[in-house]
Amino acid sequence: MTLQNIQDDLSAADTLEPRAKLFRGLGDPSRLAILDALLSDERSVQEIVTQTGLGQPNVSNHLRCLLDCGLVSRRNEGRFVRYRLADRRIADLIRDADQLLASTAVGVDACRSYTD
Amino acid sequence: MTLQNIQDDLSAADTLEPRAKLFRGLGDPSRLAILDALLSDERSVQEIVTQTGLGQPNVSNHLRCLLDCGLVSRRNEGRFVRYRLADRRIADLIRDADQLLASTAVGVDACRSYTD
DNA sequence: ATGTCATATCATTATCCACTGATACGTTAG
DNA sequence: CTAACGTATCAGTGGATAATGATATGACAT
């Protein structure tokens, strides 16, 4: 390994943490369910709660997380708050992940590290 | 919400867990560093240890996880074991994530849920 | 102003998971 | 066969975080 490579790694390390955070943001079934609910339409918290079956405080917590991360945006409408995906590419990312999972090579089921 | 929508959600729930697992597989700085090391070339465990600065058992554990998930593949060569990315699309996924992070909209830094 | 509804926050709990050190397994060299 | 090296596994530990119930905040209607 050359010095240049070492420096590449070090500078890459700066981008490692944000990348990990983004993926972790997507790496939770509840948050994925919420994002799924937002794929087609803007939704109020109540609608998300109903559609996902998750608890209301739970949904609010996850939405805060997704909002802070910039994955969703919000809009006040009276006493409702409507959320929607912040960027088309988020849906693309999820779609790409699904395609990977659909291929025979990537079979996450066999992964014993993350017990479902 | 119609009955059809409910059924869509239920069937979507089946794909939620695997998707979450895949993203969680990518949602760890150490694993991202390992995948980074494999972006250009096939690497032995030792090389990965050196390049990432992680502990050897730690690297082995993560590699097992990545292997079970199907994100990397391995090849025995004498007493060395060489790992490589299992699929080009994995690199693409990481690249797409970086592009998302580069846009102003998605600023994961502000997310307080995941303390670095 | 008061009650009601929608959403957000807080504290608690339980769980999961990454890291470490010690050790086992497997392969090659002498 | 034995030593040295590369890799994998195991047990223990600490830290992070998802879910829940209770409660607070904010907005609308009457």
Image (cartoon, coloured by chain):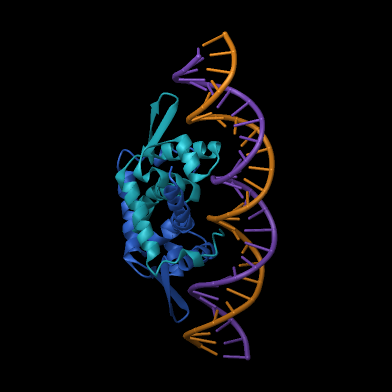
Chain colours: A cyan, B blue, C orange, D purple
Residue at 50% from the left image edge and 36% from the top image edge: A60
Q: Can residue B39 be seen in this view?
A: yes
- Residue C28 coordinates in the image, percent (x, y): 47, 85
Residue at 37% from the left image edge and 57% from the top image edge: A97
- Residue B104 coordinates in the image, percent (x, y): 31, 38
In the rendered image, the quadrant that contains the N terminus of chain B is: top left
Residue at 54% from the left image edge and 39% from the top image edge: A58
- Residue B29 coordinates in the image, percent (x, y): 45, 53
Q: In which quarter of the image is residue B92?
A: bottom left
Q: Check the image and report above or below for A17 versus A82.
A: below
Frontmost residue, C22 versus D23? D23
Q: Check the image and report above or below for A24 versus B34.
A: above
**Image side of residue B106 versus residue C22, left or right:** left
**Count of numbered labels shown in the rendering:** 0
- Residue A91 coordinates in the image, percent (x, y): 34, 49
Q: Check the image and report above or below for A52 versus C4.
A: below
Frontmost residue, A74 versus A1? A74
Q: Is residue A3 visible?
A: no
**Image side of residue A46 versus residue D12, left or right:** left
Frontmost residue, A48 versus B34? A48
